[in-house]
Amino acid sequence: MNTFDDSRLTSMPVKLRLSTASWLNKLARWPVTDYAAWVALGNSRMEHSVRGWLAVTALRSALSLRRPVALSRVDGHISALADLPQRRGARPSLAAHPIPQRQLDQCTPDMLCQVQAMLRAERTQRIAHVALGISALEKHGTALYVPQARARGIRHQGEVVHVHEPQGSLHVLLPTADAAVVCERGYAEPDSLSSLRLHARHTWLFLYYPRCESELEAIRRIVGVALDSACQL
């Protein structure tokens, strides 16, 4: 004769209570751990304070409700980057925080100086049109500006590209049709705030950190197209 085992009935509430307590503990600790993770991303235009973290968290929630930006090529447009080679391997992981937008893996410390030197060289080739300075968007880090582009609607003093120091990833403003090619080839993805911007002709991209010389050359070409477009050369 089978006997009814009531041990399950007595143990289930205990397990449920323990599970609930564990979940509540994680929920209570989340602001602390998330704040620490956000600060660890480094400097940005948002001050490292509870107020800054709350603003970023609110923005993060708002962005989660919006549809991701889908870039598409423009019929009849022949991109100067049409022959850009495909980036090899998986895309890197990016932090969940929209400000600052940062890469979490596939970074090595030996390419930052080369990225900075590349920006200076691209500026030298267009020295009559391009200025070098500190990013107006990031509030730190090397940036290239095309001052005359402000009259054509490029904001932030005509900022076109900046590097995230000390990491080495970049943000670049590209014509949308060229931006679609760069994303297709695996070198970038739309900026975390791109769904809030209404640029019809230009799009901010997050350019991944170059892992090797060939990827640095691809980034150099992308930056060159962005600057030439802003200069209307």
Image (cartoon, grey):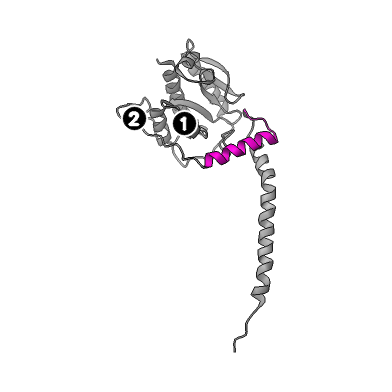
Residue 5 visible in the snapshot: yes
Categorize mark 2 by other alpha carbons within 10 Å: few (<14), some (14-19), many (20+). Answer: few
Amino acid type for the residue under numbered disc 1 = Glu
Disc 1 target residue: 215
Q: Nearer the viewer, residue 52 or 43?
A: 52
Q: Quadrant of residue 177?
A: top left
In the rendered image, the quadrant that contains the N terminus is bottom right
State the residue at coordinates (51%, 20%): 155
**Residue 159: x, y in percent?**
52, 20
State the residue at coordinates (44%, 21%): 224
State the residue at coordinates (58%, 37%): 59
Which comes before the other along the chain, label 1 or label 2? 2
Identify the secondary structure beneath mark 1. helix
Residue 55 left/right relative to 63: right
Disc 2 target residue: 74
The reply to whether the magenta stretch includes residue 175 is no
Identify the secondary structure beneath mark 2. loop
State the residue at coordinates (35%, 32%): 73
In the rendered image, the quadrant that contains the C terminus is top left
- The overriding secondary structure of the stretch rendered in magenta is helix
**Part of the protein shown in magenta:** 45-64
Q: Tell me: residue 76, above or below residue 103.
A: above
Q: Determine the CA span between mark 1 and mark 2.
A: 25 Å
For this orientation, the residue located farthest to the bottom is: 1
Amino acid type for the residue under numbered disc 2 = Val
